[in-house]
Structure formats: C-alpha cells, structure tokens
Image (cartoon, rainbow, N blue to C red):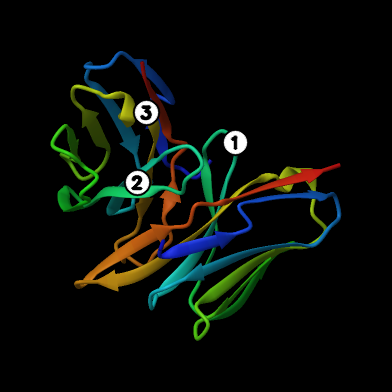
Amino acid sequence: DTGVSQNPRHKITKRGQNVTFRCDPISEHNRLYWYRQTLGQGPEFLTYFQNEAQLEKSRLLSDRFSAERPKGSFSTLEIQRTEQGDSAMYLCASSRYASADTQYFGPGTRLTVL
Amino acid sequence: KNEVEQSPQNLTAQEGEFITINCSYSVGISALHWLQQHPGGGIVSLFMLSSGKKKHGRLIATINIQEKHSSLHITASHPRDSAVYICAVRFIIQGAQKLVFGQGTRLTINP
C-alpha cells in the first residue's frame, strides 16, 4: 500500500454512459498525476495537478475527459459518453512539490466499456 | 520509434536465476525510474537514479548516461518477483518535465 487510494477499483459501464473515478493522494503531496494504461503497454500520461491547478493535459485527453482537484487534495477524473476504446486501467500517482520526486502510484481503476 | 525501449518483453526463468532487464532511451534525461507492477495493477517505485548504481536487497539498478541505457538486475530470483517491470524516463521538453514509460517486461519466475 503506497498511501494513494483510488475508487472504484473496477468499473463496468455501457458505451455512452458517464463515469467518474476518484483518487486520494498522500496527504502532504502537492502534485497529482493521472495516467492511462492499456493491456500490454506502459502507462501514458494524461494530466497533472499542482495543488488545485491543472498544469498540463496530454493530447490523449479528449474533450470527453475532464479532471478536477478542487481543494488541492483528492482528484476526480470524469469520462463522458464512454467509448469502448476508453477501456483501460486508469492510474493516479502523487508526489511532493518537486517534479523530480518519486511518484507513488495508486492501485488503479480498471474500466471496461461494453 | 518509442522514446523508451525495454527488452526483453517477456522473460521466464527458474527460481534462483540471475535476471537482467534492459532499458534504452533516445533523449537526454534528468532521471530514470524502475517500477514494479503486480498482476492487480498496483505500481511500486523501485529505484530512481540519474547516474551510477543503486542496490536494494536483491535488486540492483545501473545507468549509463552516455550510452542512454539502464539495467535492472535481480539476484537469486524468487517466484514472488514475478511481475511487470517498467522503466520510465524523466526529461525536459519545452521547459516542462515529462515522464515517459516503456512498455514493460513481464517476468515470470517458476519454482
């Protein structure tokens, strides 16, 4: 257990539905990252926050995806109008202020879109 | 060409064998991470290194900055070492730090 938690751990949804995932980082960590991992591949960066500010978004993050970290603590990742191609493991990680610090990963949320 | 390449993609060995997993990258980096991902998906950071060599228990990580290459070694391998090992490199592009992951090496240690 790294101290980063994610909920739910598994989500099965039908195409076209909206889903929301939650990440609770290690409490003193300022930075929070979202990654997506498809089968057999390494994680791909989606977006990251420093405190409540979303500082960067990957081109992978289409306009159906939105992430928030309203109080600089937990974060949510919402996917609207899900597509089968969204099926993946969604990983959250947190680190201290310095970007070179080690990132601590949560267990991930596995999304299956039917 | 991917910025981070790992080899082999899959590795099966017998308990006790010495294991080497390789990572090559194509850009100048500020740091390299080795991560371990268990079947349930959880990722654990094993090492972060920017030069030389680090050792933790039976795990050793080395990096050669000039050759843009890193290796992860496991001595006296054990079935509980079975996992996916991922190399990730940190570099700066357009003033921002990026972390790019390799595709992972699936290691299976048979008893």
Q: Position of residue A90 (x, y in %)?
A: 37, 36
Q: Position of residue B93 (x, y in %)?
A: 25, 71
Query: Mark 2 falls within which chain?
Result: A
**Going from the N terminus, do you reach mark 3 or mark 2 first?**
2
- The residue wearing badge 1 is B39
Query: Mark 1 falls within which chain?
Result: B
- The residue wearing badge 3 is A87
From the viewer's side, name the closer residue of B91 and A40.
A40
Quadrant in the rendering for residue B27: bottom left
From the viewer's side, name the closer residue of A57 and A55.
A57
Which amino acid type is marked by label 3? Answer: Ser
Distance between mark 2 and mark 1 Cα atoms = 26 Å
Label 1 CA crowd tier, 10 Å (few <14, some 14–19, many 20+): few
Which amino acid type is marked by label 2? Answer: Ser
Image depth: mark 2 or mark 1 in front = 1
Q: Are marks 2 and 1 in contact (CB under 8 Å)?
A: no
Q: Position of residue A58 (x, y in %)?
A: 22, 50
Work out whether B70 lies above or below A22. Answer: below
Q: Which residue: 38% across, 67% down?
A: B90
From the viewer's side, name the closer residue of A57 and B54.
A57
Distance between mark 3 and mark 2 Cα atoms = 29 Å
- Name the mark on residue A81: none
Distance between mark 1 and mark 3 Cα atoms = 17 Å
- The residue wearing badge 2 is A27
Label 3 CA crowd tier, 10 Å (few <14, some 14–19, many 20+): many
Quadrant in the rendering for residue B64: bottom right
Which amino acid type is marked by label 1? Answer: Pro
Image depth: mark 3 or mark 2 in front = 3
Q: Which residue: 34% across, 71% down?
A: B91
Q: Check chain identity for marks 3 and 2: say if they share one.
A: yes
Q: Which residue: 44% across, 46% down?
A: A105
